[in-house]
Image (cartoon, rainbow, N blue to C red):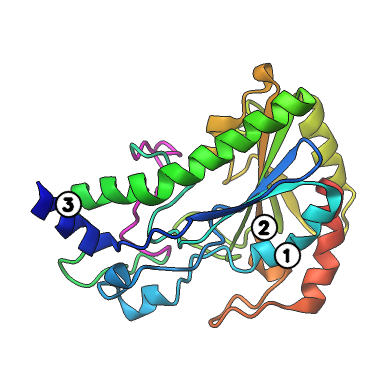
Amino acid sequence: MSNFNADIDAAIGSDDSPVFTLSRGQTPLLVSMPHNGTQIPESIAQRMTEHALRRPDTDWHVARLYEFATALGASTITPRYSRYVVDLNRPADNTALYSGADNTDVCPTTCFDNTPIYAANQAPEPSEVEARINRYWQPYHNGLAAELTRLRERYGIAVLFDAHSIASVVPRFFDAELPHLNLGTADGRSCAAALQQRLVAVLADTADYTHVVNGRFKGGYITRHYGRPQESLHAVQLELAQRSYMDEAYPYHYDDALAARVQPVLRRLL
């Protein structure tokens, strides 16, 4: 057994550094950014393709884009590691989020463009996937759940805003160009109807940006799992097209001018 555990440690890395950063605020709002992480342990990175090491499917610069959230009194939680290590917005048991559609796994093996993440015969085995879930996925969700519990106990309510971004065109998942602002509430199940209505009113009042509600992105695992309005826990997801604030081509530069235009809309949503 000890040799087996040593092999797994070698495969996923043995860095015991914290896997997320939590900043506690003074309001019932928690902003989660589960795909903002970029680090990949060397033991995993050395098995990956050159293309995957560019981390093309990262929610680039989302933490920077939402820096203003702390000034609004929101708590924030951000991961250290890339979604290629483990996808925090997928269920640990790999249940498909969108039945009948193309889905990605909790430990993905292909990029969004369907190119392989790993060199031949280097993808993680089930035992490694389990180890990654234990080391990277579970601590993040423990921290997320604990903060939501703290907020609800203090304020009587907790609201989770799951902040994401994605390339504007990803043929694997949707046809044509994605709207700028994609709000997901699990078809209205993850938050109170009044909250969705207020958020939609903000989107509808934004002439410079297109939007859709519960379109291709209805909310991932985090929104669906933690959004329990009957228990005073409300969750929404915003998938932001990256053309709204950055250069979508590698090396994915942040565009200050574009970001400054969209941030007032994000501030109004929060």
Numbered badge on residue 5: 3
Q: Residues within 10 Å of mark 3 (few under 14, many from 20)?
A: few
> x, y (%) of residue 245?
72, 70
Quadrant of res 172: bottom left
In reply to whether residue 105 is colored magenta, the answer given is yes
Question: Helix, strand, or loop for circle 2?
Answer: strand
Q: Earlier in the sequence, mark 3 or mark 1?
A: 3
Question: Helix, strand, or loop for circle 1?
Answer: helix
Q: Are marks 2 and 1 in contact (CB under 8 Å)?
A: yes
From the viewer's side, name the closer residue of 210 and 96.
Answer: 96
> Is 23 placed left or right of 80 in the picture?
right
Q: Which residue is mark 1?
A: 65
Q: Residue at x 71, y 27 (%)?
A: 152
Q: Which residue is mark 2?
A: 240
Res. 42 in view: yes
Amino acid type indicated by mark 3: Asn
In this picture, which residue range is highlighted in magenta?
94-112
> Is 42 placed left or right of 197 in the picture?
left
Nearer the observer: mark 2 or 3; the answer is 3
Question: Helix, strand, or loop for circle 3?
Answer: helix
